[in-house]
Image (cartoon, helix red, strand yellow):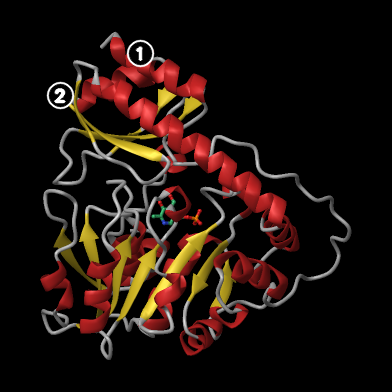
Amino acid sequence: MSLAKKLVVTTLKNLIPYQSARRIGGMGQTYLNANESAFPPYQMPTRETWNRYPDFLPSQLARAYSRYANVSPNNVLAVRGADEAIDLLIRTYCEPNRDAIRIQDPTYSMYEFVAQAHGIAIETIPLDDQFGLNVAANQQAGTDGKRLKLVFICNPNNPTGNLVPLRDIIRIAEAQRDRAFVVVDEAYIEYASAETLLPLLAEYPNLVVIRTLSKAFALAAIRVGFIVAEEDVLEQINKLIPPYPMPDESAKIGINALSDTGIEYMRSCCEQIIALREQTRNELMQLSSVEEVYDSQTNFLLVRFKKASDAMKHLLSAGIVIRDQTHFMQLPQHLRISIGVPEDMQETLSHLQRL
Ligand SMILES: Cc1ncc(COP(=O)(O)O)c(C=O)c1O
């Protein structure tokens, strides 16, 4: 056994790395596997200086986001993507080998992955057959002798695409009020028809919201996300932040995208994606290889095929890369297709018609 294998921490010994779209790979010319925006970002600023460290915390970026999200700047922490938000929350609030997080299954795999990597137990509560939350189970305290610290709810949920009613989340937050944080990942909220949870943060101090510029703002490459929560929740997380976390360029591009015209541009992109999503959904439902296309409040569609492996292979051989979801127990024949530009969707549909 190599020295590295002998010395590595226990939690990493058998950990399988997170299977991101980039890591899984797949070669093609049409990439519909990472829920990226198909639009170019809003105009990019030019660079002035490279020799200085950036701000410790990019306060202007947090202010710009607070204005967009209609919350106080004191309630916003800018981080390097929603993925870092998940990591920071788990490392700030969970003790290895003692605490637990709770996830709703199937959901975004990073909650489970980060917890595993840090030796935190994972309680899994299955979504019902409409992909709704099991509210009663989520109102319970932790089980198995572990202290439940964070309840993750992805809303709208990846990979199922649906929204859960805010009242369900509130009932869970109320039950967990003095016990655990309810962390709501709103990465896709701009594509959804329903309201965000943000106006309720003051009323429910154990609510935490995660946001990102990677999806609707079409800025996945700059790695900017936000944690929105009560000040004292952020104060603890702040202790973990390295000296100069956010590249200046990312902060500037983010601030620019959060200007009035940047927000207007983002909204018009979302409208087009939503219209194309609905059109694609209707067309997919006509196909003989497709059994169900779930209602989506995001920039992707979850599709149940008669035989998912055939559809996946067929598209891949045509250079169209989508995302396999069949590793989830409840999604045995399901694939996830991001909404690209109209030509991407036409190309995908026409190949599926030939299946
Ligand atoms: C639900 C959810 N949360 C968070 C992320 C990560 O976002 P970011 O690019 O901001 O790290 C993703 C990316 O696919 C996601 O689907």
Please state which of residues 315 and 284 is positioned toward the viewer in this rendering: 284
Mark 2: which amino acid?
A: Lys
Name the residue carrying label 1: 351
- Checking the image for residue 101, the label placed there is none
> Mark 1 to mark 2: distance in Å?
16 Å
Report the label total.
2
Mark 1: which amino acid?
A: His
Furthest residue in direction top, as rendered: 354
Give the residue at x 26% y 88%.
179
Name the residue carrying label 2: 306
Where does the image place residue 126, in percent across and percent down from the top left?
Answer: 14, 58
Where does the image place residue 182, in percent across and percent down from the top left?
Answer: 32, 75
Please state which of residues 194 and 155 is positioned toward the viewer in this rendering: 194
Give the residue at x 31% y 46%.
161
Give the residue at x 70% y 56%.
260
Where does the image place residue 106, in percent across and percent down from the top left?
Answer: 22, 52
255 sits left or right of 334 in the view: right
| Vertical side of 135 occupied by 329: above or below | above
Where does the image place residue 64, in percent across and percent down from the top left?
Answer: 67, 67
